Image (cartoon, rainbow, N blue to C red):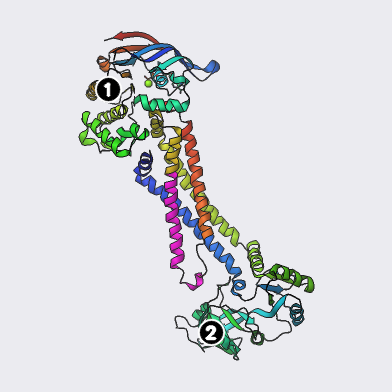
């Protein structure tokens, strides 16, 4: 597969919160292409609209205007039920606060996307264990989130984002709840395990200590993409 | 996802047990209080129930309920007997007397006088002795409660004497009667004997008990008797319900029990419903993550309903078992006899509990459905 197939294509994406004169124009015409086989960073000052753009790309928010194609599908035009299915099959999520379910073990948490896809529990948890193994968490597979360090929790979240082999992974501030060393370590892991020729990884961050991990950095300011640089 | 729902529910042990306890507690309160209430109310008609061999009660036209009667005349009895369709009609005396035991303990008793030749209307469950011996002079039958009162802890033994209005009478039978509302001992004797005990006055016939000829509907005969005599004629079940309604309308019992049941309902709704609702709200973020990951609203609704059903079923099961155990262990207590957990109360409580749980989950479901999955990216 070509290294630069297109995973996400945004053209003139706008997003307003509220309506009329009071509307907050958060995205003001975003043009952005996210290729597969790479790790793309979306960076910019706080409040510039990074999370909002990521939510639109992930199909969690509908754009006010503009065109969006995710893996060739106009995600914003899908019926809600189809959009849910699309997310389940094609997207992996990593959140700043990890968002693991506290009453599930690490392996069970990682298995959630498979459970959502009606896999039998044993099989799903088995696969999750293998994946956690690869992330250096073999010993902690039966631990509950509150028994894990932040870095370990984020690695479980990676496993959850990857287990169903999605073609687009979206991460919002994956390192901002972690200290510098741990942040570095999990980004190394993410790069090693998530970047694949037919998969795109989109990372929102304002943590410039991890910019080195990006293949491509899209700079954002005040609702617009201002610059795109490639490493 | 059932597994995930189950883990979410039971993961927080304290909250899970709190939920179950709240539902169990309100189930117990509701079913227990309603059972006692039904038991008390049915007691008001228990002496009507005890009369098994006659199905029609005739009384003064102004009679409202069992315990307050205006006497009929012998003439009334003869007129009733003359009505076509009446197979037989017999007098029944119901009054009060005072009985004194051998050790001087005395107590008001309900005195029942039954037709001399047929003894119609005496409870059929004979615990000890022989009611046909009531034909002997100065003989009475007494219910178990009465015997226990006058001869506490003593084995059933016949021919013991009591003083009834200063006359010495002999016990020839001990019967198992339904508990009357006032829970006084009941003494049964022949009609003429009863009149002697109370001191004969002219009119002492409280009721006429009658039976329709085979094939004639009771409802038709009661109408006929009322038309011909100007008296009130009711079937046993009509009279029973009239008596129950009288007590419902003229005593504070329904209101007091109503208040308890409403409190149980409020405790159930507020505590159980609220706890469940808060439980969902606290898990909102988790549900949001599941929505983002691609779990459909429908499946999330399924998860919440499943959680609600589980706590509802376990809580209800515990609560209703507590009620059942209560009535099971108090069954041998004579003062509590007749109180039991009726199937209808079980069903009604189940319906109420599941309504509460359903409402709570409906509110919870609403919150989760309107939840924007994009919240998962917010800190
Ligand atoms: N649901 C919403 N309703 C109203 N305003 C919103 C909403 N979500 C975001 N905003 C506003 O949109 C702007 C951009 O928010 P966004 O979260 O996308 O910024 P960000 O670049 O991710 O910032 P940070 O780096 O702090 O996470 C902010 O001013 C925010 O207040
Ligand atoms: Mg953000």
Residue B361: numbered disc = none
Q: Residue at x 56, y 55 (%)?
A: B259
Specify the quadrant that holds the N terminus of chain B.
top left
In front of the other: label 2 or label 1?
A: 1
Q: Between residue A107 and residue B287, name the one nearer to us.
A: A107
Residues under numbered marks 2 and 1 in contact, where contact means CB atoms less than 8 Å apart: no
Q: Is residue A120 visible?
A: yes
Dot 1: within a 10 Å radius of its alpha carbon, few (fewer than 14), some, or many (20 or more) residues?
many
Report whether B324 appears left or right of B260.
Answer: left
Q: Which residue is mark 2?
A: B173
Q: Quadrant of ligand 1?
A: top left
Specify the quadrant that holds the C terminus of chain B.
top left
Chain ID for label 1? A
Query: Image height check: is B58 above or below B114?
Result: above
The boundaries of the magenta stretch are B307-336
Residue A147 at x, y percent in the picture? 26, 37
Chain ID for label 2? B
Q: Residue at x 35, y 11 (%)?
A: A219
Q: Residue at x 24, y 36 (%)?
A: A141
Q: Residue at x 50, y 60 (%)?
A: B32
Same chain for mark 2 and mark 1? The answer is no
Q: Which residue is mark 1?
A: A194
């Amino acid at each position: 597969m070509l290294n630069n197939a297109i995973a996400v294509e945004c053209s003139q994406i706008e997003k307003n919160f509220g309506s009329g004169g009071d509307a907050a124009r958060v995205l003001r015409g975003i043009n952005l292409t996210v290729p597969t086989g790479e790790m793309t960073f979306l960076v910019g000052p706080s409040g510039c609209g990074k999370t909002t753009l990521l939510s639109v790309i992930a199909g969690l928010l509908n754009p006010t205007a503009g065109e969006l194609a995710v893996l060739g599908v106009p995600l914003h035009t899908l019926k809600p039920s189809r959009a849910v299915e699309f997310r389940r099959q094609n997207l992996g999520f990593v959140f700043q606060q990890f968002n693991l379910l506290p009453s599930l073990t690490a392996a069970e948490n990682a298995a959630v996307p498979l459970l959502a896809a009606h896999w039998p529990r044993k099989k799903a948890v088995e696969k999750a264990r293998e994946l956690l193994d690869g992330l250096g968490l073999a010993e902690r597979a039966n631990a509950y989130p509150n028994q894990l360090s932040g870095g370990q929790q984020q690695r479980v979240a990676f496993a959850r984002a990857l287990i169903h082999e999605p073609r687009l992974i979206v991460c919002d501030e994956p390192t901002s709840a972690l200290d510098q060393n741990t942040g570095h370590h999990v980004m190394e892991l993410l790069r090693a395990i998530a970047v694949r020729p037919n998969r795109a990884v989109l990372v929102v961050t304002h943590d410039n200590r991890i910019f080195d991990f990006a293949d491509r950095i899209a700079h954002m300011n005040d609702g617009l993409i201002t610059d795109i640089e490639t490493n | 996802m059932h597994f995930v729902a189950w883990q979410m529910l039971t993961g927080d042990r304290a909250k899970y047990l709190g939920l179950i306890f709240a539902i169990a507690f309100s189930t117990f309160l509701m079913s227990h209080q309603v059972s006692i209430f039904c038991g008390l109310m049915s007691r008001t008609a228990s002496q009507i129930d005890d009369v098994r061999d006659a199905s029609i009660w005739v009384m003064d036209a102004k009679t409202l309920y069992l315990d307050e009667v205006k006497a009929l005349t012998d003439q009334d009895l003869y007129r009733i007997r003359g009505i076509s369709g009446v197979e037989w009609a017999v007098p029944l005396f119901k009054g009060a007397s005072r009985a004194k035991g051998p050790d001087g303990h005395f107590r008001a008793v309900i005195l029942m006088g039954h037709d001399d030749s047929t003894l119609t209307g005496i409870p059929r469950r004979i615990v000890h002795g022989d009611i046909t011996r009531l034909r002997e002079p100065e003989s009475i039958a007494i219910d178990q409660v009465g015997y226990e009162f006058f001869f506490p802890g003593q084995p059933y033994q016949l021919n013991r004497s009591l003083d009834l209005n200063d006359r010495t009478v002999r016990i020839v039978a001990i019967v198992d009667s339904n508990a009357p509302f006032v829970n006084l001992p009941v003494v049964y004797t022949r009609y003429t004997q009863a009149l002697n005990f109370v001191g004969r006055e002219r009119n002492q016939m409280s009721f006429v008990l009658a039976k329709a000829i085979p094939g004639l509907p009771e409802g038709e005969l009661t109408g006929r008797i009322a038309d011909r005599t100007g008296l009130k004629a009711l079937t046993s079940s009509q009279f029973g319900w009239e008596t129950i309604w009288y007590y419902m309308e003229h005593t504070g019992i329904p209101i007091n029990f109503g208040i308890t049941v409403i409190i149980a309902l409020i405790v159930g709704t507020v505590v159980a419903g609220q706890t469940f609702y808060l439980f969902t709200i606290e898990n909102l973020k988790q549900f949001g993550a599941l929505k983002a990951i691609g779990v459909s609203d429908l499946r999330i609704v399924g998860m919440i309903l499943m959680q609600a059903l589980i706590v509802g079923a376990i809580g209800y099961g515990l609560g209703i078992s507590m009620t059942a155990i209560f009535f099971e262990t108090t069954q041998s207590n004579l003062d509590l006899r007749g109180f039991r957990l009726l199937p209808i109360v079980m069903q009604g409580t189940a319906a109420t509990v599941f309504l509460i749980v359903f409402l709570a989950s409906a509110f919870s479901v609403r919150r989760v459905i309107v939840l924007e999955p994009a919240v998962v990216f917010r800190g």
